[in-house]
Image: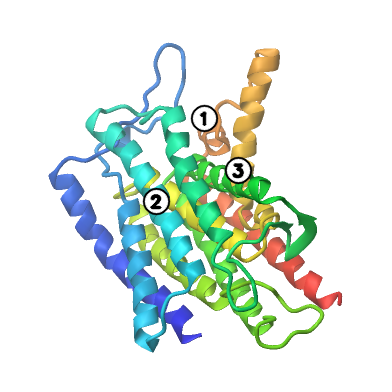
């Protein structure tokens, strides 16, 4: 448990103290993201006040996670696990893909960044290599970090062939990373929602460690590999997001950019895959799913009927155009995320107590 607390504390401290240093560097080099403005009959929320705000803040989150995780292991002189290293690989790899996107937004002043096909290609490369490695490296019990079975609160009887399992992991990672990316549209919205999700995964990891089949095999023990290290990783991510949120909350002094949103999405996906809670992510990342569904409905409705369901998608921009204040929207969406996470944890625990 000391590793979990230490990882969160170190990541929090690094992010809280390191983010203003990053802000200073980014401002000195004028590395600010382009802001979309209303034109040609297309209305966007008025974000002119955000012009000049530095982006690429996700770098602070990534560095904080790496240091929090590393210090937690050095303090007890315990080597990292394969699961932990693979989770870091996915987080950092997708963060680098996002950094390329941020580079184009900043230096080329293109608010759309890199082309969607190129971006998805980079995500696919990181996700597929992650999936292949995650289905390798069995431990002494024959357990690989990821399972070929589709999971809800633990593995289900639905076991996929290796090729389909890789495809499933890729789809899950792509969906999660893009969902977090879509949610990152208002000051503090994505970072605050991610804190709740990471905190939930830290709790799940600690619980699964205490009831793990590696210690005592009984009917409802968890076959999750390296659950304590997953809790350490999740705690580092939660701490890093809390520290970053101090500077990212309204009025934001820095944006996380795609560097942060893709890295955070990758970390969440890795935790869901390794903790065998893939389908439970629908609730543990409920706000991210809600945001994505709003975009899907908007696009589908416009293509099929020529009419829009919302004034603008993602959903938070719809409420902006309705006149809601940014802080009001973010606070209420955080409440929704808290309710989603609470329901997810309740279902996880209910599955345990019913037996």
**Label 3: which secondary element:** helix
Spatial CA distance of label 3 from label 1 is 32 Å
Please tell me which of labels 3 and 2 falls first in the chain. Answer: 2
Please tell me which of labels 3 and 1 falls first in the chain. Answer: 3
What residue appears at the point 58 percent right and 43 percent down from the top-left corner? 175
Front residue (pair 225, 297): 225
Picture layout, residue 43 above or below residue 209 = above
Q: Is residue 294 left or right of residue 218?
A: left
**Label annotation for residue 93:** 2
Report which residue position mark 3 lands on.
Answer: 171
Q: For residue 246, what is the image quadrant?
A: bottom left
Q: For residue 37, what is the image quadrant?
A: top left
Picture layout, residue 245 above or below residue 254 = below
What residue appears at the point 42 percent right and 61 percent down from the top-left corner? 88
Spatial CA distance of label 3 from label 2 is 16 Å
**Label 2: which secondary element:** helix
| 1 or 2: mark nearer the eye | 2
Please tell me which of labels 1 and 2 falls first in the chain. Answer: 2
Q: Position of residue 313 (x, y in %)?
A: 56, 31
What residue occupies the far right of the structure in this picture?
A: 355
Q: Is any atom of residue 193 visible in this view?
A: no
Q: Are marks 3 and 1 in contact (CB under 8 Å)?
A: no
Report which residue position mark 1 lands on.
Answer: 321
What residue appears at the point 48 percent right and 69 percent down from the top-left corner? 82
Q: How many marks?
A: 3
């Amino acid at each position: 448990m000391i590793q979990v607390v230490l990882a969160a504390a170190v990541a929090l401290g690094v992010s809280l103290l390191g983010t203003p240093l990053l802000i200073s560097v980014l401002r000195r080099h004028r590395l600010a993201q382009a802001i979309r403005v209303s034109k040609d009959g297309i209305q966007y929320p008025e974000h002119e006040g955000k012009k000049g705000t530095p982006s690429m803040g996700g770098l602070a989150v990534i560095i904080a996670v790496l240091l929090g995780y590393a210090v937690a292991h050095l303090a007890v002189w315990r080597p990292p696990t394969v699961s932990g290293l693979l989770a870091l690989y996915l987080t950092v790899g997708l963060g680098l893909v996002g950094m390329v996107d941020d580079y184009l937004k900043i230096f080329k002043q293109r608010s759309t960044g890199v082309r969607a096909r190129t971006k998805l290609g980079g995500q696919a490369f990181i996700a597929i290599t992650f999936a292949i490695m995650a289905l390798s490296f069995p431990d002494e019990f024959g357990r690989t970090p990821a399972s070929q079975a589709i999971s809800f609160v633990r593995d289900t009887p639905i076991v996929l062939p290796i090729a389909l399992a890789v495809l499933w992991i890729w789809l899950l990672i792509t969906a999660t990373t893009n969902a977090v990316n879509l949610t990152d549209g208002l000051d503090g919205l994505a970072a605050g929602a991610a804190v709740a999700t990471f905190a939930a995964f830290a709790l799940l990891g600690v619980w699964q460690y205490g009831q793990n089949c590696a210690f005592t095999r009984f009917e409802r023990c968890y076959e999750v590999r390296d659950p304590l290290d997953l809790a350490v990783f999740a705690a580092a991510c939660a701490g890093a997001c809390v520290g970053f949120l101090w500077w990212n909350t309204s009025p934001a002094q820095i944006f996380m950019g795609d560097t942060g949103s893709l890295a955070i999405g990758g970390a969440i996906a890795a935790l869901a895959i390794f903790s065998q809670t893939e389908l439970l992510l629908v609730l543990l990342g409920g706000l991210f799913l809600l945001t994505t569904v709003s975009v899907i409905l908007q696009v589908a409705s416009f293509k099929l009927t020529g009419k829009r369901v919302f004034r603008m998608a993602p959903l938070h921009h719809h409420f902006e155009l309705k006149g809601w204040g940014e802080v009001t929207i973010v606070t209420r969406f955080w409440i929704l995320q808290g309710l989603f996470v609470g329901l997810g944890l309740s279902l996880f625990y209910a599955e345990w107590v019913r037996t």
